[in-house]
Image: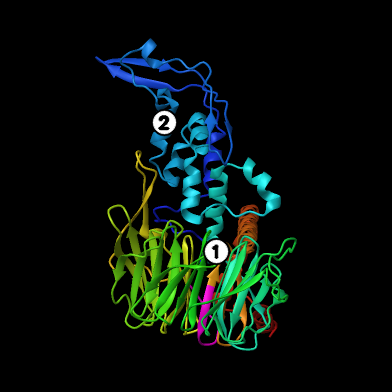
Amino acid sequence: MAFECQKDTGICLKKDLADFSDNFADQEVDTDQIITSNNQKKVIFEFGKVKPKSSFHAKGGNSSSTSENLVPAAEVLPNSCRSITDLPQALISEILNCLDPKELGIVSCVSKFLYWLASEHDVWKDFYCERWGHPITPALELEDTDERSWKELFVEREFRSKTFLGRYSIDALYGHTEAVRTVFVLASKKLIFTSGYDQIVRMWNMEEGLSIASSRPLGCTIRAVAADARLLVAGGTDGFIHGWRTEDGNPHLFDLKAQNQNLEFRLWEHEGPITCAALDFTRIYSGSWDMTVRIWDRSTLKCLNVLAHSDWVWSLVPHENTVATAAGSDVYIWDINTGMQLAAINNAHVGNSYSLARSHTGKLLFTGGEDGAIHMFEVTTNLGCKVQKIAKWIPHTGPVFSLAFEFPWLVSASSDGKLSLIDVRKLLKMSRDSLTKKSSKVVRLDEKNVEPPQRMLHGFGSNLFSVDVGPDRIVCGGEEGVVRIWNFSQALEIEKRVRALRGLRLENRMRRRKLQTEMSSKTGRSDQCSVAAKKNQIGGDRNSWHNRRRVSGKLKA
């Protein structure tokens, strides 16, 4: 499969912006000449060099500059054309704020001054956080992150997004004795949490693929797991939520084996099996077959609100002050604080709507259902909450039990034993407003024109129940009780080596051809003799040694 990013995408960079910009920025621009024609007279005006001095910090996004020897055009020639660099820096900043990443990369190639201004603009922070949220880095790398610009972070993450089109290795994690119902990736700590029919929550090291710890049997099937750096919760079919708090000094955060009342708790209010769970900074979310979604306070462990549905709740995904839920065949969006229903998608799928996923901005909502289809919706909250269907895929022949989204990849797991990878960049078109920050504009396409998934991963048995995705890994679990990790971390390195070897082979082939042409030009006579010999063979063996011997015999007779 070609290891290339989509060429026609609206927000994808065709090249690494850093390399693309640096090649042009290395060219020293001494003078800028502007030629104007006024009353059939050509006037040439020469600007001086612009050497900005700047300082920038990735967190603050502030920049300052000074220009030397800049001569205003209006003082020399009032009617001449003026450069954009003559505008106030604040106005230039507002203009750049209206551009998308690709356009900023093009602007940075014009001159060194624009390269500096576009590269150090704090709009790169907005680009990054819109796609992937705040950058997740280990504590040891925080100082290094502060020194790097937001453009460098964006370019690196955008370049890494190509890894899911490259080569991979598969790691299998054995430990569960029955089917795995849920997997969760805590990318910031490089941990994986899994559970299922064997009633045990297991914690794995994502880098090494080793088991770190496992809990005691919790007494029922665990269908939902959610975690962050401070809390781990698991939802059981007996209607309880079991939670673990972080232990100070524990490098793996949670002590799953120890029974400590200060670090463990259980919440009992659901009247049916818990099928989904989620966390944010202040709340715990749980959905159940008792047709309710409960919202809990993380500090007091009290139920704050109950969202009643008309059917079994299969999935939920919160974002800021809203939460999206899937119950029966319908999908709802609720206000967390008031408990009011903001929007509803009736009959989103033929059969049950099993899975949900949402982008970091909350503007893209994905649903997977019993009919094997995946739908993409745009959620707008400018004037009320509106939901518009954008695209539809049918990559599976069985129900879609789980969805996970890591920009720009949507990953789905189905009962047909396959994983599908869908790149949504072609459906997105960025538009920026100078008065507001930014808004992602989604292009609605005809379902017939929507491309199929960019990649399908096979090799499983039937019934994949859960999938989660990290920056360079995909983790899934299913009926066979094995947790598999698709590792793409070396995809870029492998592709670079493959391309280097391909270039060497091509270079050697061209060198051999060149030598052959040189040898043929030097040995033209030998080639003519070989041609003549071939002609004699075609004409027959008249002058051969046997014929000459017969002739000589006849003459003697």
**Camera-side residue: 270 or 356?**
270
Q: Position of residue 52 (x, y in %)?
A: 54, 25
* Magenta-drawn stretch contains 187: no
Q: Which residue is mark 1?
A: 298
Furthest-right residue in view? 249
Image point 57% across, 65% down: which residue?
Answer: 470
Q: Amino acid at mark 1?
A: Arg
Q: Amino acid at mark 2?
A: Ile
Q: Is residue 283 left or right of residue 518?
A: left
**Camera-side residue: 471 or 545?**
471
**Camera-side residue: 427 or 173?**
173
Of circles 2 and 1, the one toward us is: 1
Q: Quadrant of residue 7?
A: bottom left
Q: Which residue is mark 2?
A: 92
Pointers 2 and 1 in contact (C-beta within 8 Å):
no
Q: Secondary structure at mark 2?
A: helix
Vertical position of residue 189 compared to residue 535: above or below: above
Q: Is residue 285 left or right of residue 353?
A: right
Vertical position of residue 282 compared to residue 198: above or below: above
